[in-house]
Image (cartoon, rainbow, N blue to C red):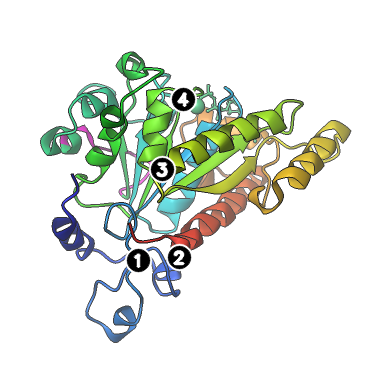
Amino acid sequence: MLSRSRLHVVAARRTPPARWRLSEGSVSGSVGTSPIRQSVPVIVGLYGVAMLVASVLSLKGGVGKTTVTLGLVSAAVHAGLETLLVDLDPQMNATATVEVDESGPSIADVLANPRRSIVNSSLRLSPWSERLRVIPGSEAAESLNYPDPTAKHLARLTTALAKVEPAPDLILIDCPPSLGQLTRSGLVAADRAILVTEPSLYAVTGVQRALEAVQQERMSHHHLQPLGVVVNRVRPRMTEHEYRLAELRDLFGPLVLSPTLPDRAAIQQAQGAAVPIHDWPTAGAREIAVMFDALLDRLMRSAKHRTKV
Ligand SMILES: Nc1ncnc2c1ncn2[C@@H]1O[C@H](COP(=O)(O)OP(=O)(O)OP(=O)(O)O)[C@@H](O)[C@H]1O
Ligand SMILES: [Mg+2]
């Protein structure tokens, strides 16, 4: 399914930012010829190249999956990473926010037939950044959201992502709020799963179910690991939120990622204006942008734990 020799050639064409490239075990490999790069160990993940794939999911709607995906996209392009956003959600909120043309081949075409020509013709460049390409979502993807998909169906996104040319440094996948074929394809295709929750009454059970879904997929796709849980829309002085956050930390320990994300109007304002949070000119946006930088750093550093498959 994956042509590793070809993918290694693709990886050799580019060099991601030094911040992650030069640290031992960073996401990129020793693909260049300079002495520094030769001293960096080759990290080979699911795709056989220096490319990290992360899926953002929750089984509950409206908790901030798209917000977290787009915040990480914004942080990634600002850090100089070649980034691909994949919108698996038939609601297409991420596609609309990064303002790509919705006509033409979409994720529905890619999943129906992950041929190289279809995959690469589905890629759109976003006005957000010259470093951001997008496989846009489609309402038609809903018809592919079978509750009980076969292994062959689940592997199609993996097959497709291996054919993206040139391979990006980072792929971020925005999943729909259900556990059908679409989200499960997103997990099968990912090195990392990022769970999102709000600090509400049902947060613990929601996170537990999402983690179980990740563990279930891990049984046949060992490369997949949960990065952790992003707790979103936290209001620090709200007793209920403090209680739920403590409950999450008690149960899930280090899987609860730092920082948690506060509830900020800037997030809705930037999304409404279809602008990356890093470019929204308010103090609230800058505060959130720094938090997404920290979450991105955590994600990229986790790549050093990737195992060869
Ligand atoms: N930290 C936050 N502060 C303020 N508003 C937020 C925050 N996080 C998300 N929102 C807002 O909440 C709404 C839902 O967020 P989002 O679309 O990211 O959720 P979702 O989990 O992707 O939803 P769906 O399940 O429908 O895909 C959006 O209007 C978003 O702007
Ligand atoms: Mg969403």
User: How many numbered tags mark residues here?
Assistant: 4
Residue 176: numbered disc: 4
Residue 63: numbered disc: none
Q: Amino acid at mark 1?
A: Ile
Q: Identify the element where label 1 is drawn.
A: loop
In the rendered image, residue 296, in percent from the top left (x then y), is placed at 51, 54
Left or right, 272 with respect to 111, comes to right
- Magenta residues span 121-130
Question: How far is the residue under mark 4 from the one under mark 3?
Answer: 13 Å
Question: Residue 100, relative to residue 164: is it above or below?
Answer: above
Specify whether tag 3 is near ligand 2 (CB below 8 Å).
no
Inspect this view and state whether residue 270 appears: no
Of tags 4 and 1, the one toward the viewer is 1
Task: Decide which of tag 2 and tag 3 comes sooner along the chain.
Answer: 3
**CB under 8 Å between callouts 3 and 1?**
no
Q: Identify the element where label 4 is drawn.
A: loop
**CB under 8 Å between callouts 2 and 1?**
yes
Q: Residue at x 73, y 33 (%)?
A: 199
Question: How far is the residue under mark 2 from the one under mark 3?
Answer: 18 Å
Question: How far is the residue under mark 4 from the one under mark 2?
Answer: 28 Å
Specify whether tag 2 is near ligand 1 (CB below 8 Å).
no
Residue 172: numbered disc: 3
Task: Decide which of tag 2 and tag 1 comes sooner along the chain.
Answer: 1
- Which residue is label 2 attached to? 304
Q: Residues within 10 Å of mark 3 (few under 14, many from 20)?
A: many
Residue 43: numbered disc: 1
What is the magenta segment's predominant secondary structure?
loop
Question: How far is the residue under mark 4 from the one under mark 1?
Answer: 30 Å
Task: Decide which of tag 4 and tag 1 comes sooner along the chain.
Answer: 1
In the rendered image, residue 244, in percent from the top left (x then y), is placed at 79, 36
Q: Amino acid at mark 3?
A: Leu
